[in-house]
Image: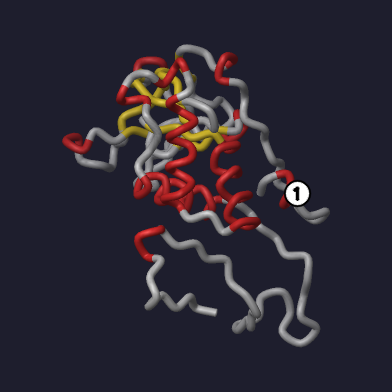
């Protein structure tokens, strides 16, 4: 979880995102973790140099995106026509490798989590805000370095959230740590401006 959401019982470390200026031109495979494809296939041993390929990727941050290349290994399970690769985890760099072509900074994804939990920011609104930031960056003048679409960012954020280990600081004396039913007295919800009509009834 983000640093601000950590509990004393959390044992999995939180890694800060490295500065984009410190990222090498070619992001290497991680020697501490085996390459993994999005289909779930994971190599059983570190790849030989002959197996490693290099492809283009874009790294997305809070302020701008940068072009880089990333080392990958062709997936042996996915059909070749799909062009899927097993790539590095990058978690120790504070980066989330979504599909080897899109790499997203933990700081960006945690920034949305922070906004959502405090001011119920909807995905569309957050994407608009970050897109405006990108227009101010000298490294985002190319069209393909614009920010992600709302649908893409939503899919990436939920994928990142599923990987996080989020513990709880409370426990029911009757039901234990994982009760089957939880009764809540509030909800965090945000709505796009086009949905703000008199007929809107938030689920509260």
Residue located at (80% from left, 83% from top): 173
Q: Is residue 108 left or right of residue 152?
A: right
The x and y percentages for residue 55 are: 33, 21
How many numbered discs, if any? 1
Q: Please, which colouring scheme is shown?
A: secondary structure
Locate residue 191: give its quadrant: bottom left
User: Does residue 27 appear in the picture of this structure?
Assistant: yes
The x and y percentages for residue 107 are: 60, 36
Secondary-structure class at tag 1: loop
Q: Nearer the viewer, residue 195 or 183?
A: 195
Q: Quadrant of the C terminus?
A: bottom right
Image height check: is 30 above or below 89? above
Q: Is residue 181 left or right of residue 76?
A: right
User: Does residue 51 appear in the picture of this structure?
Assistant: no
Locate residue 174: give its quadrant: bottom right
Q: Nearer the viewer, residue 125 or 7?
A: 125
Which residue is tagged 1?
A: 11
Locate residue 54: give its quadrant: top left
Residue located at (44% from left, 78% from top): 201
Q: Residue furthest front?
A: 198
Image height check: is 44 above or below 172? above
Q: Nearer the viewer, residue 87 or 187?
A: 187
The x and y percentages for residue 51 are: 35, 21
Residue located at (16% from left, 36% from top): 81
Q: Residue furthest right?
A: 8
Image height check: is 168 above or below 127? below
Q: Residues within 10 Å of mark 1 (few under 14, many from 20)?
A: few
């Amino acid at each position: 979880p983000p640093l601000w959401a950590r509990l004393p019982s959390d044992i999995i470390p939180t890694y800060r995102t490295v500065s984009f200026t410190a990222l090498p031109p070619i992001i290497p495979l991680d020697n501490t973790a085996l390459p993994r494809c999005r289909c779930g296939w994971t190599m059983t041993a570190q790849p030989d140099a002959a197996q490693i390929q290099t492809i283009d990727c874009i790294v997305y941050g809070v302020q701008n995106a940068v072009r880089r290349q990333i080392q990958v290994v062709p997936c042996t399970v996915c059909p070749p026509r799909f062009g899927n690769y097993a790539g590095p985890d990058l978690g120790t760099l504070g980066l989330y490798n979504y599909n080897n072509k899109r790499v997203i900074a933990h700081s960006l994804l945690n920034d949305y989590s922070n906004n959502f939990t405090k001011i119920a920011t909807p995905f569309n609104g957050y994407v608009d805000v970050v897109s405006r930031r990108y227009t101010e960056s000298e490294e985002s003048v190319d069209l393909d370095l614009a920010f992600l679409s709302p649908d893409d960012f939503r899919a990436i954020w939920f994928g990142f959230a599923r990987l996080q280990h989020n513990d709880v600081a409370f426990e029911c004396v009757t039901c234990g740590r994982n009760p089957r039913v939880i009764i809540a007295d509030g909800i965090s919800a945000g709505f796009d401006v086009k949905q703000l009509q008199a007929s809107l009834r938030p689920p509260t």
